[in-house]
Amino acid sequence: MKVAVIYNKSQDNEGVLNVFGMQNQETYNPKTVERVASALEKGGHNVRVIDGNINVIEQLQAFMPRVVQGEQPGMVFNMAYGLQGVSRYTHMPSLLEMLGVPYVGSSPAGHGVALDKVTTKVMIQAAGLPTAPYWVFYNADQIPDDLPYPIITKPKMEAVSMGIQVIHDLNSLKTAIVDLVAQFKQPVLVEQFIPGREFAVGLLGNRDPEIFPILEIDLAGDPNAIQSLEDKMKKPKGKICPSLVDEKVGKEIRRLTKETFRILGIYDFCRVDFRMDDKGNLYILELNSMASLGLTGSYFHAAQVAGYTYESMVNRMLDVAVERYFGGQQIDQVLVQEPESKAKKDPLRIRLRSYLRGNLRTMEDDLEKMVEINSFVQNIEGINSLGRWIANKLSPIGFHRHVYSRAEFGNILYLTNHMEETNDILIVGNLDNPVDFEDYNAFIEEKGRLYGTGVARGKGGIAVLLGAIKALRYTRTLKRVKCGILLITDESLGERSSKPVIEELSKKSNYVVGLRGAGLSGEIMTSCSGTLRYEIEINRRQSKGGLKSSSDVSDPILFASQKINALRKLNSEPDGIFTTITGLQTKGMEDQPTYHAALSFVVRYRTLDQKKKLEEQVNLIFTSKPQDNIKVHVTKGAQRKPFLETERTLRFYEKIERMAKLLEVRVKKSENSMVSCMANVAEGVPALDGFGPVTGAYGSNNEHVIRDSLIDRGVLLAYLIYQSSKNFDL
C-alpha cells in the first residue's frame, strides 16, 4: 500500500501564505518521522514522507493512487500537528477529508475536541465521568478571591505540558494568567490540583480497542510533583509499567479510558492521562489524540510492555485505520496486492525501497554534483570529466570500464559488473546535454522539485541508476545479474557516433532499457517518432541587367513564410506527423530589402514509409521556380530513426506493468512523439525507455525532476535489473 507520512517539517514561514494567529510550538523530531516511515516500509508499504504545508496537495496528487481509476487505495499516516491558527490538529485531517484521502488518526471533530481542554472537560463532566473542578480565565481580573489552592494552569489549546505550573496563591495566579495569555494568545484553563499519583494509558483500535498496560509516571514518592515541559524535553521522569495498582483500580482506569475515547469521538489511537488522590479517587486530566510516537514517550513504552516492537506498533496503527475505512473483510485486499505467501518469499522490494528512501539525500547530492559539471555537447573535457566521475562511483561496486574513444565527441563509456560476452540487461544513458554553459542553471531544490541544467536530460536518469545499483549491492543481489551500462556522449546530436555501439552491444543483451525521464504519469516509452532535421538557406538573387523578375517572390522573408505554411500542411495528428519550426533568422540593410533568411525545422514521423514520402515533399516545397529571384540551399541535419513498437516490446512492457503494480510504482504505456536512442537497438531485442525520474518542463530552462520520484524509479529499475537475470519469457 502507498502510505504518505505527513508531518510539519519546520516552524518557519515558507509553507504558508501569511503568518496568522497562534503559532504551533509542538514539533516531531525528524528522526521519529523517519523511524515511523522505516517501520511502515518494513511492513511492506511504499512510503513517502511529505511536509504538511502549502504544497501538500500537489505532493499527494503525485504520489497517491487514483482509486477512481481502479488503483488500490493509499493512506496517510498523519503526524502533522499543524502550523498555526485555531485548532491546528484539525487542519490536516480536514484537508484530507476534502481530498478524499483516508488517514490514520482522529477526524477533525475528534482532534478539535481533544485539543481544546475546556471542551474536553465539559464533555467528560456531562457524561458523568470524574474530572477535577475547573475555571477558565481570559484575564487576571476574572479571578475570584476564593479559589481552593493549590491549582494548576494550562493554556486552553496546547499540549506536551506547555504552560503548566502549580500555583499556591492569588498573586502568583494573576501573574501566571497575564503571562500565559500574552504568550499563547488564548484563554487559560485552571484546575484544582490533585496531589497523588499520575497515570498515562494508551489505547489502540476502534470498535473494541486494545488498552495498553497502565503506565505510571514515577513521581519519586512526591504527591505534589508534576511532569513539566522541561522534564519531558531534558530529563523525562521514570515510567513504571505495568503500574502497581490493585485490580479494582486497574479495571476502573481501563473503563474510563474507553469511555473517554468514545465520548470524545476519537479514532485509531490515543493516550488518556489520569491523577489519583490518596483516597483512590480517579480524575481524568485530558486525552491526547496525537500521542507522541517518540521512543522515550509513554505511548511506545506501554506498547512495548504489551508485546509490540516499534515496527509492529506502527503497522498495527495503520491496520486499524484501514479496517475502519474499508472493513475487516477487505483489509487483506487493501494492504496486500499479492498473496501473503508470495510477499513473504519476496522481501527484496521492501529492502530496495527502504535503502533508497534512506539514501535519498545521497542520490540528490549525486545529482547536484553532476549538474555542477558542464557537459554541454561541445565541451568534450566536461563530458569526459562527468564520465570519469560516474565510473569512479561504479568501480568500487565491481564495474569494469571500457572506453570507446571519440575525438569529435566525448568518450563513450561501457561498464559491466562481469567479464562475459553477453548481458542480462543493457542500460543506456547519456552524458551530454544541448545547453551551452552561458544558459546554465545551478542546482536548487524547491517545493519537492530539483532544478538544474541536465536534470531532466540525462543526469536525473543516471542518479536513479546509481541509486538502483547501490541498492542491489546493499541487498547482495547485484552479483546475480550480468549488467551492462552504456553512457553515450552524442544524444544531443542524434547519436551520430554512438549508433553502431548501441546496436553492437544490444545484440549481446537480453533486454535494453533507457534512462530518459518519465512524465507525471510515469510514462514508459514503447515507441517514439523519428525525426528529419533541415536547415534552409534562402538568398535573394540580383536580377540581370537590373530587370525585375516576373515573379512575385523576390523577398526571402515572404518566400520563407509561404514555405512555413506549406510545411504546416504536412501535419497529421492521426498519422503522428508534426512539423516544428525551430528557427528563423533574416539579414538586411536599413535602406535595402532583406537579402537572406535561414529557416530550420524538424519533422517528426512514425514509420519508414512516411519518412520517404516526407523527404520528397520537403524537397518539392523548397524547389524554387525559375522565375523567382530566390536561391535555396537545403541541408539535412542529424536524423533519427523511429523507435518502432513490436510484439516483444509490448510483452516486455506488460512485464514491467505487473512489476510496477507489485512495487506500487505508477507507470503508463507511452507512444511518444519525442525521440529515443532505443531506435538504434538491434532488431528483435526487447527495449523500453523512460526509466529515469519523473520530469517536468523538459527541454526548457525550467527543467526539473520530482525529488521523491528518484525513489520510485530507483526501486523499479533495481527490481527490473534483478529480474532480468531470470530471463523473462517474452
Image (spheres, rainbow, N blue to C red):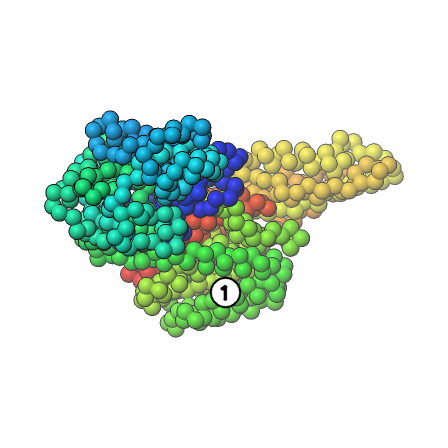
Q: Locate residue 105, reporting x and y percent.
A: 30, 39
In front: 100, or 203? 203
At 60% from the left and 59% from the top, the residue drawn is 374
Q: Locate residue 358, reporting x and y percent.
A: 39, 57
Q: Residue furthest bottom?
A: 419
Q: Quadrant of residue 110?
A: top left
Q: Is residue 90 visible?
A: no
Is residue 217 placed above or below 171 in the rendered structure?
Answer: below
Name the residue that disc number 1 marks: 390
In front: 141, or 189? 141
The quadrant of the rendering that contains the N terminus is top left
At 35% from the left and 62% from the top, the residue drawn is 472
Figure disc tally: 1
Q: Locate residue 413, reporting x and y percent.
A: 50, 66
The quadrant of the rendering that contains the C terminus is bottom left
- Side (left or right) of 282 relative to 551: left
Is residue 212 placed above or below 511 in the rendered structure?
Answer: above
At 17% from the left and 51% from the top, the residue drawn is 244
Give neighbour class at mark 1: few <14, some 14-19, many 20+ (Cα, 10 Å).
some
Three-letter amino acid code of the residue under disc 1: Ile
Q: Is residue 143 visible?
A: yes
Q: Quadrant of residue 171?
A: top left
Q: Residue furthest left?
A: 247
Is residue 563 placed above or below 31 in the rendered structure?
Answer: above
